[in-house]
Amino acid sequence: MLTAKPEVWEALIEVKPHAEKWECTPIGNYEKLAEIYGKDRATSVGAETAKEKVRRWANSSNNDHVDKIEVIDELVHQNEANLESFVVDEDDVVLSPKSGTSSKAKKRKLSNDGERDVDILKTALQDITSAIREGNVSIEKSQGCFPRGELNKALEEIGIAPHLFTEAYLFLTKKSERMMQFFGCPVKYHKETLESMMYDPENRWVYMLCLVVFAVLYNAMPASFPQYVTEAITGPLPDPPGLKLLKEGLTAKHPVVFVPGIVTGGLELWEGHQCAEGLFRKRLWGGTFGEVYKRPLCWVEHMSLDNETGLDPSGVRIRPVSGLVAADYFAPGYFVWAVLIANLARIGYEEKNMYMAAYDWRISFQNTEVRDQSLSRIKSNIELMVATSGGRKVVVIPHSMGVLYFLHFMKWVEAPAPMGGGGGSGWCDKHIKAVMNIGGPFLGVPKAVSGLFSAEAKDIAVARAIAPGVLDMDVFGLQTLQHVMRMTRTWDSTMSMIPKGGDTIWGGLDWSPEEGYECTAKKMKNNDTQTVGQNGKGSLINTTHVHYGRIISFGKDVAEAQSSEIERMDFRGAVKGNNLANTTCRDVWTEYHDMGIGGIKAVADYKVYTAGSILDLLQFVAPKMMKRGSAHFSYGIADNLDDKKYEHYRYWSNPLETKLPNAPDMEIFSMYGVGIPTERAYVYKLSSAAECYIPFQIDTSAEGGPGCTCLKGGVFSVDGDETVPVLSAGFMSAKGWRGKTRFNPSGIGTYIREYNHAPPANLLEGRGTQSGAHVDIMGNFALIEDIIRVAAGATGVDLGGDQVYSEIFKWSERINLQL
């Protein structure tokens, strides 16, 4: 391709417009052409063409025939001759140089067959020429070079608004990669692609990378790609759990109920505003998330709930998708329940004995019944499954927040109407064989605090540090984090995961149950599946004392200081002052805009917050949100569980303020991953003041260094599944419910099943079969095998009892809780 600086081309094109096509037109096979014709175009002394050279030979005195094919090859190779230089003599079959004086009578006449061969040859050459031309076009586009006229035409065809035309043109022409992305997709998607790219231009490469990887792994390759390629590299894979247990003779027995967690269930539109026209019964959550890119503000508007009631805003109805498809995949290629469902199907399960208890995970648990009768539907379906399976009880498998939702259900179903389902005190014992909780945040998660406080957690904080300002910028009228906060703060369900139990469970300024945990401790080998039991080996002692009880600290120095050295000013009585931001931000309004500078400063001056003061903090910065939340959820520890107040539904999802049902034959499993650094506490700082801003953010510059490897990017980590710390997932089964306690009066059997995380060995293994990550564990073969065995009739004892790799029993003993 001819290359020159843009200004050179612009000057040339202005004088000679027809030269524009050469700016982006590569010269195909240039090197080979130079080799063939280079000497023919020489102009120095002694230069001559192949024809001139042949004529000179013909006139030479010897005039010998060139009768050896090797000589011809050599001449052609050296550009001394081409095939036009030779003809077949009428009386001889020997090839000879073409003489300039040769008569036509000496040439063989072409036969009809010969003429047909020539036509075929011409056609073939035309096809080759066409293919080369198309190849040149592909080369042009692969190099991101497109004539200006073609881009102008494409922008006009997609109907881009006049005031955005210049901006779009400059945006695309600034980088060749953007042109490749724009022209590389089908024409009908040009406008959508352009809007997606311009919405987040600095991070489009991440989106495109994911798109390419997805296309290669899930679209371009055959369905059996992962298995046969992996087996070719690593040897035969083990049988999937379903097939393995089928060979052992296991078959479907107990009906199975799946209870999805937060964000993993699909939501579809049933009624919306004008901007959502054409989206009736289309997924707004889950699937491809196309509407996030096509109409982001409309999407946020519809996904948000009413800030006063926590229910549907006027004119909007979004409802959960029903059936197994509601949560089998979160997005194309990203499984949630699909792998477990497929393995259960191996031993005979189908839709008649598998049920997805879908619900709108945005709204409070009790409101799912008020609005959609979701709890009643679960009750009816369980009763039907038990009745149609010969009286066999169900095995319930909740995941993530679904664990808390089903805990609420077990209290609701036995409570008298109208607040409860009216099933009576023996309903759970009669209908439920086992509850196999996966990744259950029984006592909440610190990540919920950072999400509600600043609309970020570790991943968002890191992205913010890599590309400062990108998540706060206003492109196409969308300020990302502000809109995320505005939307998620209307989702009452998120408040169910605020840490429960206060300082008694999570620790205070100077202590925490996980003291001494070392993030870089040696983990068990990937294939080590032994049962460690209650004396599970833990991590090495940290060289720096980490105050995990300080869930939020303003400054690394505060996080590390002795409590006696921290000077704090109480924020609770502070005057918030006035802030005009809420009059100018409008659509990106959050309750921070009503705080004023005085209120923001008061929050930072309090320095450090433990689980005991987190609730007061959230009440101060988000009073409307917490007013709704406190009507549906509780976070304390009951003094007397026989107190009538605990019959109210706001206590039903807190295991520290409610009793398990009277079901001695039922079993409860706590199943979760370990061996992954999991968010436990945060170092914060004040954000730079700006209009419509979130005033607090994680300080990603805070690093622990060699003496404290548990602090990275402003986040203190402990053992867990990347989302739920071990303490939250395991404490109730390790101590709170172990044996007969005031929280478990009938002595329901409880078991801990931990799965030590082992990442996939290579890309071909996808998300792995030994993962302990919060969602990826749903594809963990060992976990799936445990579930299938229980569904087929096994008990916790049959599985081998507890399987523990963490220090959960040690940490639980440090918690002084009346049992």
Image (cartoon, rainbow, N blue to C red):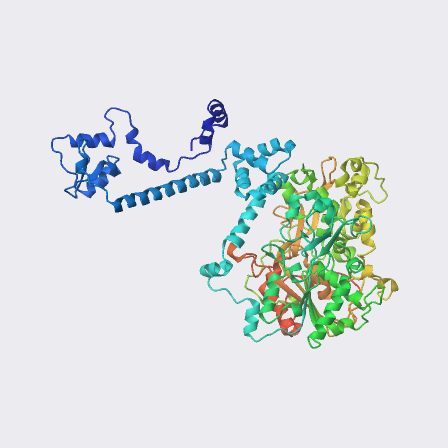
Residue 57, by quadrant, is top left
- The residue under the point 13% across, 34% down is 63
How many discs appear?
A: 0
For residue 93, side relative to residue 576 (left or right)? left
Q: Does 789 appear above or below 3?
A: below
The answer to whether residue 548 of the structure is visible from this angle is no
Drawn side of residue 187 relative to residue 564, left or right? left
Image quarter of residue 748: bottom right
Using the image as rendered, state which of residue 369 and residue 511 is in the foreground: 369
Where is residue 438 shown, x and y percent of the image?
67, 62
Q: Nearer the viewer, residue 437 or 376?
A: 376
Reply above or below: 276 against 527.
above
Q: Residue at x 55, y 34 (%)?
A: 153
For residue 778, above or below residue 564? below
Residue placed furthest toward the left:
62
Residue 457 in picture, x, y percent from top left: 68, 48
